[in-house]
Image: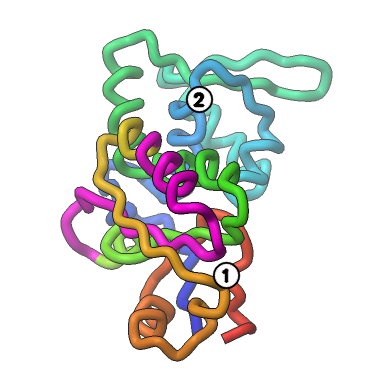
Amino acid sequence: MIVIIHVMKTSAPTLLPLLRSNLQGEVTALLFLHPERQYTVSEIAALTNASQATVSRELSRLEDAGLLESRQVGKSRLVNALVHTPVGQALQQLMYVTYGPVPALREALAQVPRLEAAAIYGSWAKRRSGEPGQVPHDLDVLAIGTPSRHALYEAIDDVEQRLGLEINVKKLSREGWNSDDPFVKTVRSRPITPIFGDLGDNDA
């Protein structure tokens, strides 16, 4: 059985205790990874799996702090991060190495042919789930499918450069992921953070 933990507590997240919640980190990372892009509240809510009302409150806090700007277009509120300040630049780098891995990897790996699903496991996933410990200095990524080694590692290299974190990739076929392999059993029994695709919880 795969342990996928969605933390709903409002206590400080172990991934970055400076923040109030994991959602705050996810919203901020999404905006600061793409400061050139304007998002609607509904887009951010869908990408972070949160309600529009909750996301709207988080955005208002960031805007009040001068970290993003917004404008109204019809019924839609468009927002984008402000990174051209010392605080904005520092926050952008902090988001890259804490909450940036999931959106950055999703963007890169979703373009890799024959890659069916991907997830983060290991220490980063443990911190994301709320287990205490030091901030991870690398990422363990599970890649499920039959992608070419070249395409997979080219995408991973791009994310490594962007985040400044070493990424260790474990590639498995769908059959391998659904097997009784000891490694697979260990990964399934511990926290895992989905990046994209179907992890096949019911297939194992």
The disc at residue 199 is: 1
Which of the pair 140/150 is nearer the observer?
150
Identify the mark nearer the N-term, 2 or 1: 2
Amino acid residing under circle 2: His
Residue stretch rendered in magenta on the structure: 132-158
Q: Residue lying at the far top in this picture: please name it.
A: 84
Q: Residue at x 43, y 64 (%)?
A: 171
Residue 126, magenta (yes or no) = no
Q: Residue at x 50, y 29 (%)?
A: 31
Disc 1 packing (10 Å; few <14; some 14–19; many ≥20):
some
Amino acid residing under circle 1: Leu
Q: On screen, 106 above or below 95?
A: below
Q: Residue lying at the far bottom in this picture: please name it.
A: 180
The residues tagged by marks 2 and 1 sit, at their Cα atoms, a distance apart of 27 Å
Horizontal side, residue 201 vs residue 188: left or right: right
Badge 2 is on which residue? 34
Q: Residue at x 16, y 56 (%)?
A: 134
Disc 2 packing (10 Å; few <14; some 14–19; many ≥20):
some
Q: On screen, 144 above or below 82?
A: below
